[in-house]
Image (cartoon, coloured by chain):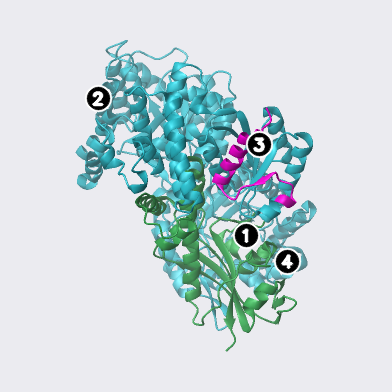
């Protein structure tokens, strides 16, 4: 392992276009929709207590075989042809866990019972928040990172999640935990690999 | 020397980081640090001795993660913890004997988070967490530690579980520290005032913060602790945040910066200090050096005399600013509410809570007591469900001590307890619960002799309650007196007596008061007017809180005026906001102006008002127009359903299928239709016990999210839409076992069973359920849906139908009906 780190960020601007996309109404100009979105954003501001935190480590790529999909990253060995393709030509990889905290989960739960439209928008806002956080984090590296690759994409199984949380120290630093199906709580959390090109 | 005696007059110096030092000494990433207790005791002892040598009074055992989840083998867990205690003791001995360090030394059993989130965020049940922590405490206390440290907890409820475990399994002193973020909150939202109120209530010996940030970023958090805590305050920050620099992990706060900041906090009143991640014996040595070179002496610990309750996010303090306690979660005199309790209609109860929260009450009273109901179970469930959707503190309102204990235990925070009174039997049942779980108790001034007629008689009871509480170790600040508000329609002197009582309790006994204020107007016309008058009068006598109806404009007017007149509303901003929204909120529009509110667009040009409202998803309009159609125009409710509601839903459904409308719009229309149904249902029920909302009871549907899957948004949408179309839907919830689904299908003789799964991992459970239903209930058609499913996948697991979305499920059920394929 090359090193480990932890970072907190200030709240990024809301990207409303993305929220609408996640809420399954991309590009809508329907006033009712837009007004609900604004109400939800407003409530998130008061009640979601978002925190924008990332815990990460930088690993050397010590072995990579695209045809078999075997990837050695110093401390771990993974098997995924798709990730191997994504990391081809990289000397190092940033492995990170990011979360905006569990407050939004409570709002989603609240509206799941009471107002399905708001539940949908709360989901969408949470998704937009954590993706914006990932973008901010990846932008802090001086090198340009490869597009992030997360467990669940392609043939990269969710079963690597425990390993990722352990390597990034995410359970201690960010309180991200896994359920039996390897899904994360808080639900608006992301783990991902982002390759750094060889110089 | 005992730790508590030492703490009374001294600063206590804790240790610093352990994990990063173990890594330097060979701990591999992914390896459990606690295994070093047995594999390399010399390394652990060496690090701990270095802390004692640097001046630490307390060193934590290396047991941060020594819980059952990391050590499923109970024997291994036991040996790891026992070895940890032995190592720390050995480090203390070596420091004393070899290094000649003579400061008092204590060993603390370290307890970190379980690494599992508790419900409602995660899956872990409170009692399972208590059991897990209890085991650590039993082993650690048995191995002979001097105190217990609960640390780095980032969730209020998990902290409560750990503290309960300590209190139930040993008599050792306990320090509790939580991990706060830059916004001054725990991950799950609690601020220092909330944590302090809960932890002090449960008997923590010291409270504070550790980990997460560097010392500078925690200044605000420490200020809040020092303002709120009546017990010693703990400060154990990181050496800043770690980052990767030149291929190495470094922390961004230097030893000197760290020590200066810690010393500053000690000068401000912090009594117990140490370091967390990234700190080393150097940090501790620097701090102890400065303490002695500066000749620093500790400030005394003072009681802040705060009367507070809290939720899992914030504390509510009883002071000059009046506290509103919403009274609506209570079946007394409410037929609809009683029915909801009997039907176990939790959504209705939650809605009553959320509607009051929208009116800005501070606390919600929760009373679910009706005859022949399992009150302990129901109250506890209601508390949990309410706390999943609102962050307001709750007032647990029951006369059943068993219900009170179960609900208090489950409550996340420091609850308000309603109530005790001067009866010995009641006090001896309730006060031990207050002592154990913490709480602010409402004390009614009545006793075995009933309610004294005079103020003086009630004051005598109040004094007796204060004295008895003291015997249980409950301070006056945790009592709030209700001198009982009786109706003036029965006794015109009743209010005078109550007001006099409030005045004496406030001025002379210096205690806080609360009144169930609505009683005053019972039996009178324009009750809210009278109640609000009483409210104003009582506030002038010093009333601290009222259990009241927040939907009454008169009450809210009194509240806002009182605050503005008494300089409690800066710039009168709350009053102005209230006044500005007053007309909209409380003055009902005399006529519905469809052209203004339900604006017509080309696609809605030929529709009726109600259809337009539904298509546009306007809930309030839909409800108002339906009411007008029925009450003023005399329209037949069932004709409204067939001629307006269903056609409107069809327009939206078709728009959605043709991708002209989006899912949220479909949902909004469904919600608007639901509002119309509420009115229609009321009308039908008032006429006869007729089939509500035109439900097609001849087609029964059971739906569930399959076992192992906790995602229910999609399933809920399907349910909503099916109900909209008049089908009778029984929703079994999420994570439902195949046998339970079969049971429901069989007992209801359901025609259709809808199953949802979001994850590939739970599709096998879906397949199993389908097989079971086909085998044991062959008449029932199974339709499936969910993110991972496709038509092909659905065919493979033997489903009768696949719906790609909620409309699809409606269409499928309709097709069954029209094909006559439905079982009769």
- Boundaries of the magenta span: B795-824
**Do circles 3 and 2 both sit on a common chain?**
yes
Whether marks 1 and 3 lie on the same chain: yes
- For marks 4 and 2, give the one nearer the viewer: 2
Q: Residue furthest top?
A: B490
Q: Badge 1: how crowded within 10 Å, few (<14), some, or many (20+)?
A: many
Figure check: B3 above or below A3:
above
Task: State the residue position of label 1.
Answer: B60
Q: Name which residue lies at 64% across and 58% down.
A: B64
Q: Is residue B808 magenta?
A: yes
Category of crowding for the residue at label 4, using alpha-carbon neighbours closer than 10 angstroms: few (below 14), some (14–19), many (at least 20): many
Chain letter of the residue beneath label 3 in the structure image: B
Tell me the element at label 4. helix
Mark 3 against mark 2, which lies toward the viewer? Answer: 3
Residue labelled with disc 4: B36
Q: Residue furthest bottom?
A: A199
Q: CA distance from mark 3 to mark 2?
A: 57 Å
Task: Provide the letter of the chain coloured cyan.
Answer: B
Q: Residue B43 at what x, y percent from top left? A: 71, 70
Q: Is residue A45 left or right of residue B749?
A: left
Are labels 4 and 1 on one chain?
yes
Q: Which residue is tagged 2?
A: B533
Query: Which mark sits nearer the N-terminus, 4 or 1?
Result: 4
Q: Quadrant of the C terminus of chain B?
A: top right
Residue B209 seen from this side = yes
Q: Disc number at residue B488?
A: none
């Amino acid at each position: 392992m090359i090193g480990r780190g932890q970072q907190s960020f200030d709240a990024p601007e809301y990207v409303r276009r993305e929220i609408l996309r996640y809420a399954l109404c991309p590009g809508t100009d329907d006033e009712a929709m837009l007004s609900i979105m604004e109400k939800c954003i407003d409530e998130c501001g008061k009640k979601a207590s978002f925190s924008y935190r990332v815990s990460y480590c930088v690993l050397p790529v010590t072995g990579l075989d695209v045809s078999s999909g075997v990837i050695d990253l110093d401390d771990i060995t993974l098997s995924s042809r798709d990730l191997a393709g994504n990391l081809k030509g990289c000397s190092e990889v940033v492995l990170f866990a990011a979360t905006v905290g569990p407050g939004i989960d409570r709002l989603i739960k609240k509206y799941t019972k009471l107002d399905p439209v708001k539940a949908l928008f709360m989901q969408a806002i949470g998704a937009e928040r954590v993706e914006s956080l990932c973008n901010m984090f990846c932008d802090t590296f001086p090198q340009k990172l490869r597009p992030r690759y997360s467990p669940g994409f392609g043939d990269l199984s969710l079963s690597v999640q425990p390993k990722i949380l352990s390597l990034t120290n995410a359970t201690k630093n960010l309180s991200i935990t896994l359920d039996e199906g390897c899904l994360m709580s808080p639900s608006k959390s992301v783990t991902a690999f982002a390759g750094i090109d060889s110089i | 020397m005992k730790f508590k005696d030492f703490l009374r007059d001294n600063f206590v110096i804790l240790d610093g980081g352990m994990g990063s030092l173990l890594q330097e000494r060979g701990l591999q990433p992914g390896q459990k640090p606690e295994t070093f207790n047995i594999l390399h005791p010399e390394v652990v002892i060496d690090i701990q001795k270095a802390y004692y040598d640097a001046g630490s009074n307390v060193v934590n055992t290396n047991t941060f993660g020594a819980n059952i989840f990391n050590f499923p083998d109970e024997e291994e867990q036991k040996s790891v913890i026992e070895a940890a205690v032995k190592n720390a003791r050995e480090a203390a001995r070596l420091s004393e004997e070899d290094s000649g360090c003579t400061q008092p030394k204590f060993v603390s059993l370290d307890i970190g988070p379980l690494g599992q989130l508790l419900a409602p965020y995660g899956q872990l049940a409170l009692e399972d967490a208590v059991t897990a922590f209890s085991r650590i405490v039993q082993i650690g206390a048995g191995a002979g530690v001097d105190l217990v440290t609960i640390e780095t907890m980032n969730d209020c409820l998990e902290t409560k579980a750990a503290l309960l475990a300590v209190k139930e399994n040993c008599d050792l002193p306990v320090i509790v520290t939580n991990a706060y973020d830059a916004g001054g909150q725990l991950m799950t939202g609690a601020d220092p005032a909330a944590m302090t109120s809960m932890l002090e209530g449960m008997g923590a010996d010291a409270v504070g913060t550790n980990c997460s940030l560097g010392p500078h970023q925690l200044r605000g958090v420490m200020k809040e602790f020092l303002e709120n805590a009546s017990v010693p305050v703990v400060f154990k920050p990181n050496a800043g945040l770690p980052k990767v620099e030149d291929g190495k992990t470094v922390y961004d706060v230097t030893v000197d910066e760290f020590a200066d900041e810690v010393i500053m906090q000690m000068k401000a009143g912090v009594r117990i200090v140490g370091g967390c991640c990234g700190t080393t014996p150097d940090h501790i040595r620097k701090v102890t050096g400065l303490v002695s070179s500066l000749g620093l002496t500790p400030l005394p610990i003072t009681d802040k005399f705060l009367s507070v309750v809290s939720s899992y996010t914030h504390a509510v303090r009883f002071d000059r600013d009046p506290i509103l306690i919403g009274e609506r979660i209570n079946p007394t005199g409410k037929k609809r509410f009683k029915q909801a309790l009997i039907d176990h209609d939790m959504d209705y109860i939650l809605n009553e809570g959320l509607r009051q929260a929208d009116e800005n009450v501070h606390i919600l009273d929760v009373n679910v007591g009706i005859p022949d109901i399992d009150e302990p179970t129901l109250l506890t469930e209601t508390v949990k469900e309410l706390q999943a959707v609102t962050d307001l503190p709750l007032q647990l309102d029951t006369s059943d001590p068993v219900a009170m204990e179960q609900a208090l235990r489950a409550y996340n925070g420091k609850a308000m307890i309603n109530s005790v009174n001067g009866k010995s039997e009641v006090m001896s049942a309730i006060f031990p619960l207050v002592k154990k779980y913490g709480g602010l108790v409402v004390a009614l001034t009545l006793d075995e002799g009933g309610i004294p007629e005079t103020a003086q008689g009630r004051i005598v009871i109040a004094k007796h309650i204060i004295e008895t509480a003291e015997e249980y170790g409950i301070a006056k600040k945790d009592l709030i007196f209700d001198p009982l508000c009786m109706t003036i329609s029965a006794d015109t002197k009743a209010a005078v007596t109550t007001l006099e009582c409030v005045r004496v309790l406030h001025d002379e006994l210096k205690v806080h008061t609360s009144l169930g204020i609505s009683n005053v107007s019972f039996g009178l016309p324009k009750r809210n007017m009278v109640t609000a008058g009483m409210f104003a009068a009582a506030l002038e006598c010093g009333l601290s809180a009222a259990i009241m109806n927040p939907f009454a404009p008169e009450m809210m007017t009194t509240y806002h005026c009182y605050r503005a007149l008494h300089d409690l509303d800066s710039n009168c901003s709350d009053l102005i906001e209230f006044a500005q929204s007053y007309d909209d909120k409380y003055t009902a529009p005399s006529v519905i102006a469809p052209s203004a509110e339900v604006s017509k667009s080309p696609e809605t040009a030929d529709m009726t008002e109600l259809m337009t409202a539904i298509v546009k998803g306007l809930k309030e309009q839909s409800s108002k127009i339906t009411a007008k159609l029925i009450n003023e125009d005399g329209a037949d409710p069932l004709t409204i359903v067939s001629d307006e509601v269903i056609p409107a839903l069809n327009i939206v459904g078709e728009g959605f299928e043709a991708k002209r409308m989006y899912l949220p719009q479909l949902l909004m229309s469904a919600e608007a239709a639901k509002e119309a149904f509420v009115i229609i249902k009321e009308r039908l029920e008032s006429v006869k016990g007729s089939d509500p909302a035109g439900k097609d009871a001849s087609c029964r549907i059971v739906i569930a999210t399959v076992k192992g899957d906790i995602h229910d948004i999609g399933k809920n949408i399907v349910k909503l839409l099916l109900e909209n179309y008049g089908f009778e839907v029984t929703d079994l919830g999420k994570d439902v076992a195949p046998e339970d689904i079969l049971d429901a299908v069989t007992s209801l003789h359901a025609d259709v069973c809808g199953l949802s799964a979001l994850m590939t991992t739970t599709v096998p459970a879906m397949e199993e359920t389908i097989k079971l239903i086909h085998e044991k209930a062959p008449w029932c058609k199974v339709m499936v849906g969910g993110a991972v499913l496709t038509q092909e996948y659905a065919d493979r697991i033997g489903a009768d139908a696949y719906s790609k979305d909620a409309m699809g499920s409606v269409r499928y059920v309709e097709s069954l009906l029209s094909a006559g394929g439905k079982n009769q």
